């Protein structure tokens, strides 16, 4: 039996006023989120003008003199910024390569659990780290990785090895940052994929079972293809934050011994903007980061549509 799609425009048109009166309670629920976006996202965009001025606290935003793209020219000529940009890209790529598949894998594993009680328990255990602040997580990291009192280094010493300075050696910083980020956020990321899997028609699995497909083949030939659009959308959103590594985690793990690889754009703008008072330059760095994220979203969306996987628009 073929179900014919209803032609666009075949439904009776409802006026905007009538629609608003009928569904006003939905718009009331939407209002707080809309106000939040306007106040904390759109209004602050006016501060972009600082990036093109030599901002002075006494003269204010509008009284400070225009300097054009002076701060951007300095930014691309600065060896310190180029080092920070490289660090941000490397850590972001590591997080994308290791962290993006992690929620998908966890969602697939949770979906294959037969015991609902055990499944709910594991979901709670995986979600819990997301609600722990990075300050507390850093304390946990210290308890595990401290050279003198850390659990891992004590075990290494008991086995005849030498303590490893995980938190002070530059070569370990990226691994620690990526692994702890996955531990904290991967479980929460499974929410979207679990919802997408729950929306799959069970008859697809029944047909696959009749055809003799094993559990692994059902995952690769039924589950993954049917949540492909969700994966693509999440990848597009993740691409937009490719240069964003978060401030709290990096700042807490950062110290004088690993700063060569630990300084990223967020901590750099904090240091030059708030601690050194170079507000215009830090605004230029932040604007550059936002523009790159905006471009990456469009490029990823364009590429996904070219290969036939759909996109955000």
Image (tube, rainbow, N blue to C red):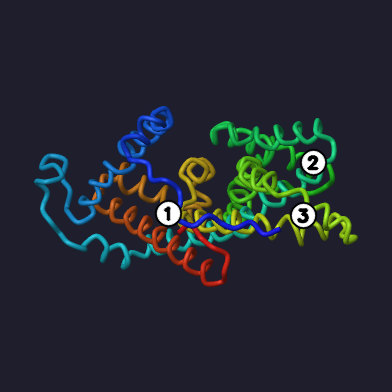
User: Disc 2 and disc 3: Cα gap in Å?
Assistant: 49 Å
Residue under the point 40% across and 34% down: 33
Q: Are marks 1 and 3 in contact (CB under 8 Å)?
A: no
Q: Is residue 31 above or below residue 54?
A: above
What is the x, y in percent for residue 19?
Answer: 37, 36
Q: Quadrant of residue 136?
A: top right
Q: Judge from the rendering whether residue 135 lies leftward or rightward of residue 212; answer left or right.
A: left
Secondary structure under the numbered disc 3 in the rendered image: helix
Residue at numbered disc 3: 204
Q: Quadrant of residue 97?
A: bottom right
Crowding near pointer 2: few (<14 within 10 Å), some, many (20+)? few
Residue under the point 58% across and 32% down: 131
User: Disc 1 and disc 3: Cα gap in Å?
Assistant: 32 Å
Q: Which mark is residue 9?
A: 1
Residue under the point 17% across and 54% down: 53
Q: Are marks 2 and 1 in contact (CB under 8 Å)?
A: no
**Which one is earlier in the sequence, the residue at label 2 or at label 1?**
1
Secondary structure under the numbered disc 2 in the rendered image: helix
Q: Which one is in front in this view, the residue at disc 1 or the one at disc 3?
A: 1
Residue at numbered disc 2: 155
**Which one is earlier in the sequence, the residue at label 2 or at label 3?**
2
Crowding near pointer 3: few (<14 within 10 Å), some, many (20+)? some
What is the quadrant of the C terminus in the image?
bottom left
Nearer the observer, 263 or 255: 263
User: Disc 2 and disc 1: Cα gap in Å?
Assistant: 69 Å
Secondary structure under the numbered disc 1 in the rendered image: loop
Q: Judge from the rendering whether residue 264 lies leftward or rightward of residue 115; answer left or right.
A: left
Residue under the point 61% across and 45% down: 192
Q: Is residue 245 above or below residue 228?
A: above
Nearer the observer, 237 or 149: 237
What is the x, y in percent for residue 121?
Answer: 76, 31
Q: Which mark is residue 278?
A: none
């Amino acid at each position: 039996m073929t179900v014919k799609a209803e032609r666009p425009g075949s439904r009776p048109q409802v006026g905007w006023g009538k629609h608003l009166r009928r569904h006003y309670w939905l718009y009331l629920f939407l209002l707080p989120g809309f106000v939040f976006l306007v106040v904390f996202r759109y209004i602050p965009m006016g501060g972009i003008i600082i990036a093109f001025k030599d901002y002075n606290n006494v003269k204010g935003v509008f009284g400070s003199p225009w300097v054009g793209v002076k701060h951007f020219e300095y930014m691309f000529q600065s060896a310190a910024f180029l080092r920070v940009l490289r660090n941000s890209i490397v850590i972001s790529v590591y997080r994308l390569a290791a962290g993006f598949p992690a929620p998908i894998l966890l969602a697939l594993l949770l979906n294959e659990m037969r015991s609902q009680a055990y499944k709910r328990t594991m979901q709670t255990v995986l979600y819990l780290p997301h609600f722990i602040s990075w300050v507390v997580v850093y304390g946990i990291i210290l308890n595990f990785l401290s050279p003198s009192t850390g659990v891992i280094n004590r075990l290494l010493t008991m086995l005849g090895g030498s303590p490893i300075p995980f938190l002070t050696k530059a070569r370990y910083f990226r691994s620690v940052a990526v692994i702890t980020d996955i531990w904290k956020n991967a479980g929460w990321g499974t929410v979207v994929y679990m919802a997408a899997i729950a929306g799959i028609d069970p008859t697809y699995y029944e047909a696959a079972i009749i055809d003799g497909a094993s559990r692994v083949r059902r995952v690769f030939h039924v589950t993954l293809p049917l949540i492909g659009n969700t994966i693509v959308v999440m990848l597009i959103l993740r691409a937009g934050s490719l240069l964003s590594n978060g401030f709290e985690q990096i700042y807490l793990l950062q110290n004088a011994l690993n700063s060569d690889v630990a300084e990223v754009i967020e901590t750099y703008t904090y240091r030059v903007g708030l601690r050194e008072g170079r507000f215009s330059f830090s605004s230029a760095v932040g604007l550059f980061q936002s523009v790159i994220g905006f471009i990456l979203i469009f490029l990823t969306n364009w590429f996904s549509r070219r290969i036939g996987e759909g996109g955000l628009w």
